[in-house]
Image (tube, helix red, strand yellow):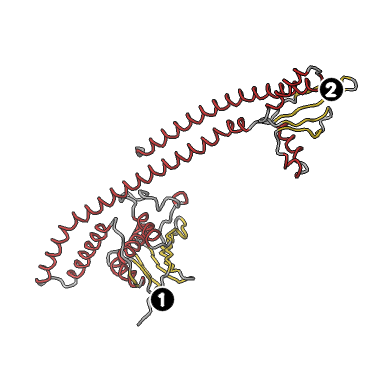
């Protein structure tokens, strides 16, 4: 099912095409009409020149002079029968004619590109002598031709703004929906988690297996953490100076006891053992949990997961590598898209949320550094290091 804004987008594009097409056709019609009128005016002007040169009747000469001086819009250049510029012109920039050596030649080439046939005034038949008059376009004709282009730009800008606004509105509504669902999930989880806490306290008072109760307590605390995460979706995260190595160790301690005996997990924390930087610990834990779970799914209960760290030019690098099935090349560009998953269960939101947490909130990067089918994958986190506070 297509989103609602998509239908509006198609409608806007169709309206724009109709408007611009109609404008272009009408503008071409008007431009053609103006061009024909301008040719008639140039022909009348040339005829007036003929009268001025050949007539001896003062009334005719006065009328021809009046017609000649009334043309103050259409630029004209005069050439001889050999198509050489004679030096006479009309409605051109006089200053440029004087200052720029090839100005008239450039304008003549421009007029010829308009494909207007020159209007010829024969002065003598034998030997043949004539003036040829090339003419350009008036400012009005240029504006009429330019109008549909300007309108197209305005309509395209309007459609772009409208589409961006509709998409932003749609995404905002989707984000609000997800935030509302997350908060409702947190609310629904709250009651059974509170009940589990009560039962856990009862178990502690009775003589039960002392190894089981702490593990159940960890799971209950984990549920409390998940409830807290969902309850804070849509809120601004709180940052504090934290040691990422400790956060990863805490996550691995929980995950190792809940994986099979054929899964080996290693963590090289030496480069960042004493390193502190600004983090949102709950969100950072969420990212690491998603990446480790993703690696566990990839190795399918049998393989190795290694987490390596390094510091490079003010950035913290964390690589999560697995020896799993790898990612197909045609899926590499989609793994972070919301809803994308190759598993039968799940909504495909884990990696998408992780990327948003790292890049939007922590101003870092999360991407697939390497992947090969049948050999495994490496996901890399890059976090900018914040200056550590000075000790008093």
Residue 41 in picture, x, y percent from top left? 68, 23
Position of the C terminus, as image quadrant, is bottom left
Q: Residues within 10 Å of mark 2 (few under 14, many from 20)?
A: some
**Residue neighbourhood size for the residue with mark 1, other residues' Cα within 10 Å, grouped as few (<14), some (14–19), many (≥20):** few
Depicted 101 relative to depicted 363: above or below: above
For the residue pair 376 and 12, the one nearer the viewer reads as 12
Disc 2: which residue: 123
Tell me what residue is drawn at x 45 percent, y 71 percent.
310
Q: Give the quadrant of residue 327.
A: bottom left
Q: Identify the secondary structure beneath mark 2.
A: strand
Q: Which residue is mark 1?
A: 270
* First-in-chain label (2 vs 1): 2
Left or right side of 144 for 137: right
In the rendered view, does 324 fall on the left or right side of 256? Answer: right
**Residue 132 shows up from this direction:** yes
Q: Nearer the viewer, mark 2 or mark 1?
A: 2
Looking at this view, is 221 or 175 the one in front?
175
> In this orientation, does residue 260 appear?
no
Location of residue 288 with respect to 38 vertically, above or below: below
Q: Residue at x 83, y 24 (%)?
A: 130
Task: Looking at this view, name the residue that lies furthest to the front.
Answer: 58
Residue at 38%, 79% (x, y): give it. Answer: 390
Which residue is nearer to you in this view: 308 or 161? Answer: 161
- Residue 123's place in the image compared with 231, above or below, is above
Q: Quadrant of residue 264?
A: bottom left
Measured as percent of width and height from the top left, residue 166 is found at 38, 42
- Quarter of the picture holding the N terminus: top left
């Amino acid at each position: 099912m297509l989103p609602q804004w998509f239908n509006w987008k198609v409608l806007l594009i169709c309206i724009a095409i109709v408007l611009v097409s109609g404008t272009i056709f009408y503008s071409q019609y008007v431009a053609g009409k103006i061009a024909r009128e301008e040719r008639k005016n140039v022909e009348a002007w040339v005829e007036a020149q003929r009268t001025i040169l050949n007539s001896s009747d003062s009334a005719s000469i006065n009328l021809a002079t009046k017609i000649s001086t009334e043309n103050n819009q259409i630029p004209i250049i005069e050439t001889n029968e050999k198509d050489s510029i004679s030096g006479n012109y009309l409605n051109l920039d006089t200053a440029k004619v004087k200052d720029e050596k090839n100005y008239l030649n450039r304008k003549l080439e421009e007029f010829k590109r308009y494909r207007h046939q020159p209007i010829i005034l024969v002065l003598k038949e034998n030997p043949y002598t004539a003036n040829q008059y090339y003419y350009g376009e008036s400012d009005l004709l240029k504006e009429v031709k330019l109008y549909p282009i300007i309108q197209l730009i305005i309509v395209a800008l309007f459609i772009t703004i409208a589409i961006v606004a509709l998409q932003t509105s749609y995404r905002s509504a989707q984000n609000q929906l997800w935030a509302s669902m997350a908060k409702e999930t947190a609310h629904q989880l709250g009651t059974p988690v509170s009940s589990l806490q009560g039962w856990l306290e009862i178990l502690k008072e009775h003589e039960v297996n002392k190894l089981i109760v702490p593990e159940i307590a960890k799971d209950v605390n984990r549920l409390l953490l998940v409830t807290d995460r969902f309850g804070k979706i849509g809120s601004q995260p709180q940052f504090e100076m934290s040691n990422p190595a400790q956060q990863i160790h805490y996550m691995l301690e929980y995950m190792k006891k809940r994986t099979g005996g054929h899964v080996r997990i290693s963590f090289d924390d030496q480069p960042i053992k004493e390193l502190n930087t600004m983090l949102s610990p709950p969100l950072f834990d969420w990212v690491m949990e998603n990446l480790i779970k993703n690696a566990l799914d990839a190795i399918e209960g049998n393989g190795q997961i290694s987490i390596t760290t390094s510091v490079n030019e003010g950035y913290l690098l964390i690589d999560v590598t697995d020896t799993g099935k790898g990612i197909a090349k045609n899926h590499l560009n989609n793994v972070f898209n919301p809803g994308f998953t190759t598993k039968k269960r799940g909504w495909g939101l884990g990696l998408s949320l992780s990327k948003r947490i790292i890049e939007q909130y922590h101003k870092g990067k999360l991407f697939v550094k390497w992947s090969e089918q049948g050999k495994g994958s490496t996901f890399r986190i890059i976090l900018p290091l914040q200056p550590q506070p000075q000790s008093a």
